[in-house]
Image (cartoon, rainbow, N blue to C red):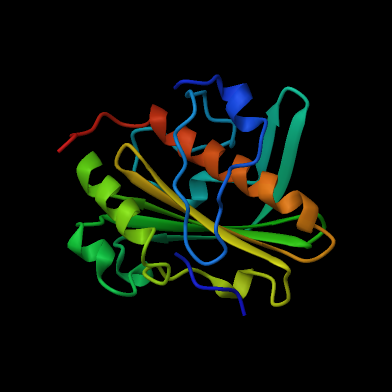
Amino acid sequence: MLLPGGFTFSLHKYLSAPAPNTAAASPTADPTPEPKEPSTGENERQDSPIDADGYGDWNFRLGSVTFKAKKVGGWTYGSCAPVDRHGVLARNKCERAVQLAYAAYRGHLTAVQVIMSFPTVKAAKATAMRLTSSSGAVKWRRDKMLDTYVYARQRVTSTKRYVILTIVAADRTAQAKATRFQHYLHTDRSNSFLFRDSIASD
C-alpha cells in the first residue's frame, strides 16, 4: 500500500537536475524556479476557479527533455472537505480542490496531484508548511496508484494562493525515471499558477 500523502537560476538550469532531498514519507518543498508559460495544456481560463476538466494529458518539453503522461482521472470539489483528513485545510480556509490522476511508461508509473486554492497567499504558504509535517492530512485517490511499487514519493509547495501536492509511485521498470518525472511534473504544474489571477497577499 502506498504511503499516505501528504529566481536565481534559469528555468532550464533548475529543471535539468532532479530535485534534492525528496522524501518517501513526507512532502518536500523546493525553491520556485524562474517562471515560464505553462506547458501543461490547460484549457481553463487563468482567472477561473480550478477545475479538473481544464487539465488534459501532460505533455512537457524543455529543450531535449520530454515527458508524457496520460490523464486517467479528474475530480473537482466545490470545497476542500472531501480531501481534508485532519482539518488542516479547513483551519486555513481552503476554498476548492481538484485531483488529477496520471499514468506513464505503459502504466509502470502513476501519479496523483491534489491542487487546492486558498483566499490568500499567506494561507496557502501556511498550509504548505503544515503539510510538510503532516503527510496524512490530505486524502488522495489511492485507487489510481500502483499497488506494488519500489518508488513512492510526495512533494508539496505553494504558488500564489494555491497548494500543489504531487504523489508518484513507480515499479522497478520505471524506477530510474521516477525522480526526474516527479520533479518536472510538480514544478511545471506549480509554475502554471504564477500566471493565474490577481490575488490578495495577506
Q: Is residue 96 above or below residue 81?
A: above
Whether residue 48 sits left or right of residue 126 in the image: it is right
Question: What is the quadrant of the N terminus in the image?
Answer: bottom right
Judged from this view, the residue extending furthest toward the right is: 173
| Residue 87 in view, yes or no | yes
Q: Nearer the viewer, residue 79 or 201?
A: 201
Whether residue 69 sits left or right of residue 19 in the image: it is right
Q: Residue at x 20, y 57 (%)?
A: 92
- Which quadrant would residue 153 be assigned to in this image? bottom right
Rendered location of residue 87, percent (x, y)? 25, 71
- Which quadrant would residue 158 be assigned to in this image? top left
Q: Is residue 123 above or below residue 89?
A: above
Q: Nearer the viewer, residue 127 or 79?
A: 127
Rendered location of residue 88, percent (x, y)? 26, 66
Judged from this view, the residue extending furthest toward the front is: 21
Rendered location of residue 135, percent (x, y)? 42, 67
Question: What is the quadrant of the C terminus in the image?
Answer: top left
Q: Residue at x 49, y 28 (%)?
A: 33
Q: Is residue 177 above or below residue 18?
A: below
Judged from this view, the residue extending furthest toward the bottom is: 1
Rendered location of residue 101, percent (x, y)? 59, 59
What number of labels is visible? 0
Q: Is residue 90 above or below residue 125?
A: below
| Residue 73 in view, yes or no | no
Q: Residue at x 39, y 47 (%)?
A: 50
Whether residue 199 sits left or right of residue 157 in the image: it is left
Judged from this view, the residue extending furthest toward the left is: 202
